[in-house]
Image: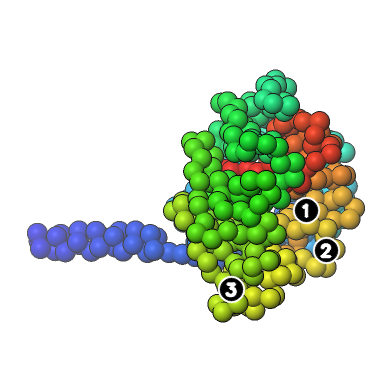
């Protein structure tokens, strides 16, 4: 009898170990289930995937001819059927959907369908009476964040430090210094003994800001590598000079790539290692990073200011002015001043986030959208539009004037 009991206990233990192992090593699942609420049937297609970008769930909710796309991080231990309820609002041609998850989870957004087009709550809340409905949604954050009007001053910049997130660092170029703005304090970091009005080369790579050191416009012999978090600055000396006519190809895997158009040489700088490497010349050829793949090209092809870019061809039908990519979404800004978000797996369903004219120097960092309007730098995310900094100079000089690092 004891042997039988021991055998049964062993089987149970083996089963649980097996289930835990399957869950631990699982990298994806694709399930479909139905939620019947009132007289409505919501069909949910849930896709979990794990890749180099992280662990995410894609939630596709269909009702009749309407489709709503949500995207959430893995806070559910890779479980299935993570949507436990759906809150909806219907009036005339307006239909809004908000998923409620099996664990407390901040909602990505409340998405609404109007005549077959998708809108975020932020884009229509002032046109439709949705505040009462939104206020009752669990974990819905929009308009629950207090926007501070308190300002601090550093140089000629007024900053809203209380509006900055704990792990967020905004770097503002100040001609011979960098202004580091964080929730706790502002810091000014020297990098030059004289003003350089146009920031042509300054690039943030991971937590490092890289700038060439120029002396009387002579060929560059060294680069400043500034650690944004510690504010420490180190000089990377080149064994050979680069001309003053070079451009930045881009950053890949936390390394900076640039091309010297006079000497026909391509370099890579690793700021973490405080080192550089010659990776292209007339004998080696050049390298281009396209759609996640390195390609060998003629060194002469790089004379045409070849910038490493993402492939946005699948967004071409939207006639965008500018396009951006995060780990989860594509974003684009069109000729009508509409700013959209579209899921990488569902490129047919863009969601209008907002409509704003005259956006300048747009950046997307970890699904936070940053832009300058007139003299103010803003951040937009699920909490809405929040001012970060004001500067009169933004109105006249905004190109490469700021960068953002999320720790």
Q: Nearer the viewer, residue 316 or 180?
A: 180
Quadrant location of residue 298? Answer: bottom right
Residue pictured at 63% horizontal, 43% vertical: 404
Is the Cβ of the residue at disc 1 closer than 8 Å to that at disc 3?
A: no
Residue annotated with mark 3: 281
Position in image of residue 334 (x %, y %): 85, 56
Image quadrant where residue 15 sits: bottom left
Residue 106 vs residue 373, the one in the foreground: 373
Q: Position of 23 compared to 98: left or right? A: left
Apparent side of residue 69 relative to residue 185 in the rendered image (left or right) = right
CA gap, disc 1 and disc 3 = 41 Å
Pointer 1 or 3: first along the chain = 3
Left or right: residue 158 versus residue 166 is: right
Count of labels in the image: 3
Which residue shows up at 19% across the image and 61% down it?
10
Measured Cα–Cα span from mark 3 to mark 2: 39 Å
Q: Are marks 1 and 2 in contact (CB under 8 Å)?
A: yes
Disc 1 designates what residue? 340
First-in-chain label (3 vs 2):
3
Residue sitting nearer the eye, 353 or 154: 154
Outermost residue, right side: 336
Q: Assess disc 2: are there few (<14), some (14-19) or many (≥20) residues with their C-alpha within 10 Å of its C-alpha.
A: some
Residue at the left extreme of this rendering:
2
Which numbered circle lies on residue 318? Answer: 2
Tag 1's secondary structure? strand
Q: Position of residue 311 (x, y in %)?
A: 69, 68
Q: Is residue 103 above or below residue 51?
A: above
Q: Say which of marks 1 and 3 sits in front.
A: 3
């Amino acid at each position: 009898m004891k042997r039988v009991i021991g055998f049964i206990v062993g089987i149970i233990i083996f089963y649980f170990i097996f289930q835990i192992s399957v869950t631990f090593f699982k990298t994806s699942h694709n399930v479909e289930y139905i939620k019947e609420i009132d007289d409505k049937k919501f069909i949910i297609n849930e896709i979990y995937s794990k890749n180099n970008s992280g662990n995410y769930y894609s939630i596709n909710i269909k009702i009749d001819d309407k489709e709503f796309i949500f995207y959430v991080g893995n806070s559910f231990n890779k479980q299935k059927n993570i949507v436990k309820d759906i809150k909806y609002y219907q009036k005339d041609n307006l239909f809004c959907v908000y998923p409620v998850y099996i664990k407390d989870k901040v909602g990505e957004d409340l998405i609404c369908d109007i005549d077959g087009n998708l809108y975020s709550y932020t884009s229509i809340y002032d046109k439709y009476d949705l505040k009462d409905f939104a206020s009752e949604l669990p974990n819905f954050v929009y308009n629950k964040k207090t926007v501070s009007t308190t300002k601090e001053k550093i140089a000629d910049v007024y900053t809203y430090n209380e509006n900055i997130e704990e792990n967020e660092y905004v770097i503002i170029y100040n001609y011979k210094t960098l202004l580091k703005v964080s929730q706790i304090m502002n810091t000014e970091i020297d990098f030059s003994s004289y003003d350089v009005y146009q920031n042509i080369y300054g690039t943030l790579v991971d937590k490092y800001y890289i700038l060439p050191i120029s002396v009387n416009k002579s060929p560059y012999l060294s680069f400043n590598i500034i650690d944004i978090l510690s504010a420490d600055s180190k000089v990377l000396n080149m064994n050979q000079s680069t001309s003053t006519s070079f451009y930045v190809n881009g950053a890949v895997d936390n390394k900076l790539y640039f091309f010297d158009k006079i000497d026909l040489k391509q370099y890579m700088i690793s700021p973490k290692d405080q080192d550089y490497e010659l990776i292209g010349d007339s004998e080696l050829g050049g390298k281009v990073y396209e759609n996640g793949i390195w390609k060998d090209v003629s060194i002469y092809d790089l004379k045409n200011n070849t910038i490493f870019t993402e492939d946005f061809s699948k967004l071409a039908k939207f006639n965008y002015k500018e396009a951006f990519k995060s780990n989860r979404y594509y974003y684009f800004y069109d000729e009508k001043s509409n700013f959209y978000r579209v899921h990488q797996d569902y490129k047919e369903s863009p969601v209008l986030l907002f409509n704003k004219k005259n956006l300048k120097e747009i950046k997307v960092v970890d699904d936070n959208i940053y832009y300058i309007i007139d003299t103010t730098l803003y951040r937009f995310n699920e909490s809405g539009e929040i001012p970060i900094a004001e500067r009169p100079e933004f109105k006249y000089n905004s190109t490469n004037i700021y960068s953002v690092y999320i720790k």
